[in-house]
């Protein structure tokens, strides 16, 4: 079992390295792609700055605090886009009937799908997240950094990315039955990113509960940032729950994984 | 269909040409009808984003009741109008023309006995009509149900809006055409198209209402073509543009439609002269 995972991982690295080499053949193109994507994502952030012109605060959150939340959400999402690109493009694989071939190879289907795409241009969003993070830090000099507060940052980013990837996987699983697009997952990925870039408490209780307890995206972004900023959580949740984020994300990912395996077992080819 | 179209073009009468373009638009409209599920998913996405921005607005307006002459009701209407209009005036990720340039198909379109620009224009106007009925209206209705937006009661506002929206759609088509024909010079221009779309959406007021821009940025944004894309029709709908300001807004739209259309046609004719067909 451990041996298998290790072998899979080595293969994954190998396949990704191949993709990287292929893309780096066109260095200028890759650079232009990354820079344009960085510009697009930076433009997406500008509204946050503009909002705080006419309005002093967002339900008590200052511009620096919202920027911090925005930055962490952006980095999580950027990582998910980078590593989950193959899952995101899965509907194409199904439509073209290429999944038949995937099933014939002696490697797990999940591994093959994940390693089928790796887009360097996605670094643009991660770079934007880093820039916004630096900007947020410059506006929040009063944060008393402790070892735990430092630890909560990578926990947030990795847990958030894991939940985003799990959402992509659930969307891909849906393709086994619907064949067509995964456009519905856009609501949870792009919509979820937009939604969690702002403090969760501005939304109505139903939406808050949904992103806490059903699709636990808030565990990856909002809750750890509340810990960092020393803000209370909704529904009387203890703020230390931030450190349970990886477990919650992992549980959600395992559910998504089980659904995926169920889908693979029930796959019927499009026959074209 | 093309045999009929060709026949009509040879007749070369003005009326026949108009009928041809009308048929192109109608066909594009009907083709779009097939994508029912995709449209439903898109509609839900528009509604979801409308909901997010609404809550952001409601939270912001807790800090003060009026900003830039807008109260919370105005801001919510503006936001839902953006979600409702975006697919009508500026379809996301529209690279249809770019792809025909890359595949070489464009040559057959260029040699059709009708005008290349008006051919694509008709196709896109047909799609705009579709999105107005099946995306725009339901999106705004959802906003009315969820946040009690209501609609303006003044008939004159509706008339002004009905004049402004088609101009906005024409503007959007010319702009889309512009960043697509870049492919005549740069083969993989999709990233550029993404940036062009983001800039347009930003300055059209789709990310944040234009009235909330800081004064210096608003001064710039007013004169850009994107102002007429969504901000002018939205402000008309809200009753914020009346009298001289209304005429100015509409005039700006007309000016940019003419300028962009002429510019795009000029560029196309330059590009068409140097088209080299790849492969066979």
Image (cartoon, rainbow, N blue to C red):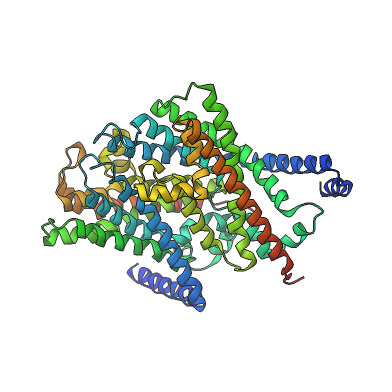
| Image-based side of A262 in relation to A95, left or right | left
Residue A218: % across, % down: 28, 47
Q: Quadrant of the C terminus of chain A?
A: bottom right
Vertical position of residue A147 compared to residue B166: above or below: below
Q: Quadrant of the N terminus of chain A?
A: bottom left
Is residue A272 visible in this depiction of the protein?
no
* Depth check, front residue: A214 or A60: A60
Residue B88: % across, % down: 57, 41
Residue A66: % across, % down: 26, 49
Residue shown at the point (76%, 41%) measured from the top left: B23
* Depth check, front residue: A49 or A60: A49
| Image-based side of A60 in relation to A83, left or right | left
Q: Quadrant of residue B48?
A: top left
* Depth check, front residue: B135 or B272: B272
* Depth check, front residue: A80 or B106: B106
Vertical position of residue A137 compared to residue B30: above or below: below
Vertical position of residue B121 compared to residue B264: above or below: above
Q: In the rendered picture of this protein, how many numbered marks are placed on residues?
A: 0
Is residue B257 visible in this depiction of the protein?
yes
| Image-based side of B179 in relation to A20, left or right | right
Q: Quadrant of residue A5?
A: bottom left
Residue A69: % across, % down: 26, 52
Residue shown at the point (82%, 49%) measured from the top left: B2
């Amino acid at each position: 079992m451990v041996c298998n995972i290790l072998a899979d991982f080595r293969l994954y690295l190998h396949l990704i390295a191949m993709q990287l080499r292929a893309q780096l053949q066109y260095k200028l193109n890759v650079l232009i792609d990354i820079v344009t994507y960085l510009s697009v994502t930076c433009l997406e952030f500008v509204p946050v700055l503009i909002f705080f012109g006419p309005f002093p605060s967002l339900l008590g959150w200052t511009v620096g605090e919202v920027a911090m939340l925005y930055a962490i959400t952006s980095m999580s999402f950027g990582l998910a886009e980078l590593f989950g690109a193959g899952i995101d493009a899965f509907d194409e694989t199904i439509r073209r009937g290429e999944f038949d071939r995937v099933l014939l190879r002696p490697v797990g289907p999940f591994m093959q799908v994940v390693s089928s795409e790796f887009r360097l241009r996605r670094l643009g969003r991660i770079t934007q997240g880093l820039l916004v993070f630096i900007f947020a830090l410059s506006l929040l000099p009063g944060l008393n950094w402790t070892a735990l507060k430092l630890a909560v940052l990578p926990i947030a980013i990795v847990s958030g990315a894991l939940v985003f990837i799990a959402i992509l996987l659930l969307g891909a699983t849906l393709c086994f039955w619907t064949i067509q697009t995964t456009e519905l997952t856009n609501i949870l990925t792009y919509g979820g990113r937009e939604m969690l870039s702002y403090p969760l408490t501005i939304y109505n209780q139903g939406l808050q509960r949904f992103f806490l307890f059903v699709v636990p995206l808030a565990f990856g972004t909002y809750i750890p940032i509340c810990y960092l900023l020393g803000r209370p959580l909704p529904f009387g949740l203890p703020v230390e729950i931030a450190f349970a984020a990886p477990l919650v994300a992992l549980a959600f990912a395992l559910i998504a994984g089980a659904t995926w395996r169920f889908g693979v077992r029930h796959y019927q080819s499009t026959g074209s | 269909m093309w045999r009929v179209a060709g026949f009509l073009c040879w007749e070369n009468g003005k009326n026949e040409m108009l009928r041809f373009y009308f048929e192109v638009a109608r066909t594009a409209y009907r083709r779009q009808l097939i994508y029912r599920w995709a449209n439903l998913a898109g509609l839900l996405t528009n509604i979801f984003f409308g909901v997010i921005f609404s809550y952001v607005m409601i939270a912001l307006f807790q800090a003060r009741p009026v900003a830039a002459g807008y109260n919370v009701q105005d801001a919510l209407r503006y936001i839902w109008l953006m979600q409702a209009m975006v697919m009508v005036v500026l379809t996301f990720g529209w690279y249809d023309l770019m792809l025909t340039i890359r595949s070489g198909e464009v040559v057959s379109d260029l040699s059709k006995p009708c005008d290349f620009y008006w051919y694509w224009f008709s196709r896109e106007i047909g799609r705009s009509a579709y999105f107005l009925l099946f995306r725009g209206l339901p999106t705004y209705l959802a906003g009315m149900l969820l946040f009690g937006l209501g609609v303006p009661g003044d008939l004159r506002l509706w008339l002004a809006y009905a004049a402004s929206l088609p101009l906005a759609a024409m503007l959007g088509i010319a702009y889309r055409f512009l960043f697509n024909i870049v492919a005549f010079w740069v083969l993989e221009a999709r990233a550029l198209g993404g940036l062009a779309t983001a800039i347009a959406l930003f300055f059209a007021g789709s990310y944040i209402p234009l009235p909330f821009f800081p004064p210096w940025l608003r001064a710039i944004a007013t004169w850009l073509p994107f102002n007429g894309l969504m901000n002018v029709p939205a402000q008309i709908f809200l009753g914020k543009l009346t009298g001289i300001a209304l005429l100015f807004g509409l005039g700006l739209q007309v000016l940019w439609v003419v300028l962009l259309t002429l510019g795009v046609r000029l560029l196309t004719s330059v590009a068409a002269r140097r088209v080299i067909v790849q492969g066979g």
